[in-house]
Image (tube, rainbow, N blue to C red):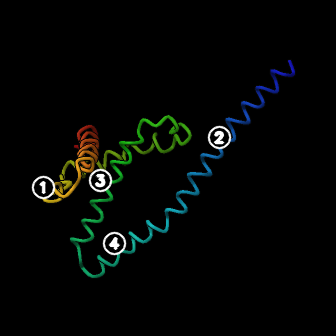
Amino acid sequence: MKKIILIIIGIVLLVGSFVLGACVGITAFLQADAQFRASIATYNLKALDANRLDALRTSLELDVDGNLWLYSKGVNNPFLVLWPELTSQGIESLKHTASYRYQNPRGYASQKVLKAMSVEEQDRLINQGQKIEALVQKYGK
């Protein structure tokens, strides 16, 4: 009986430490990534101050597509149960973003750029575009 209790306690501690480690890890990643996000925001603010709206638009359009692609990669991740607030409250944000992309379609790469890419890069870009488009079709209006 003592052996079973020790095994159960061990499993609970193992699962608890995994969850805690995952939360600490994602927090550390977000903190480390903040410097790059701040740099991009600074670039956008400088572009806005200089009235370089095309550069600002390009940067923000890339943000939209990049985040839609990241969402499409992680939407079925089983570890999302660790952060239920991201899935239960995020659907309106996703609909808002997908609707924007639906109403404002954008090409992902010109033929000139595609010709300069390797076959693997072309396939990766096409795959990303298809995932983004699937989200836009599902959630956009």
Q: Residue at x 38, y 42 (%)?
A: 73
Labelled pair 1, 4 in contact (Cβ < 8 Å): no
Q: How far is disc 4 from disc 2 in space, using C-alphas?
A: 38 Å
**What residue would you read off at disc 3?**
65
**Alpha carbons under labels 3 and 1: distance apart:** 19 Å
Question: Element at badge 1?
Answer: helix
Alpha carbons under labels 1 and 4: distance apart: 27 Å
**Residue extending furthest toward the top:** 1
- Camera-near label (1 vs 4) is 1
- Which-is-in-front pick, marks 1 and 2? 1
x and y, in percent, of residue 54 in the image: 21, 71
> Could you tell me the amino acid type at mark 1?
Gln
Side of 6 where 123 appears, left or right: left
x 78%, y 30%: residue: 9
The residue to which callout 4 is attached is: 44
The three-letter code of the residue at mark 3 reads Asp
- Judged by depth in the image, the label closer to the viewer, 4 or 2, is 2
* Residue 38 versus residue 3 in the image, above or below: below
Per the image, the residue denoted by label 1 is: 111
Q: Amino acid at mark 2?
A: Phe
Work out which quarter of the rendered image holds the N terminus and state it: top right
The residue tagged 2 is 18
Q: Is tag 3's residue or tag 1's residue first in the polypeptide sequence?
A: 3
Mark 1–mark 2 CB contact (< 8 Å) = no
Task: Tell me the crowding category of disc 3: few under 14, some 14 to 19, or many 20 or more residues within 10 angstroms, Cα based.
Answer: many
In this view, the mark in front (3 or 1): 1
Q: Quadrant of residue 83?
A: top right
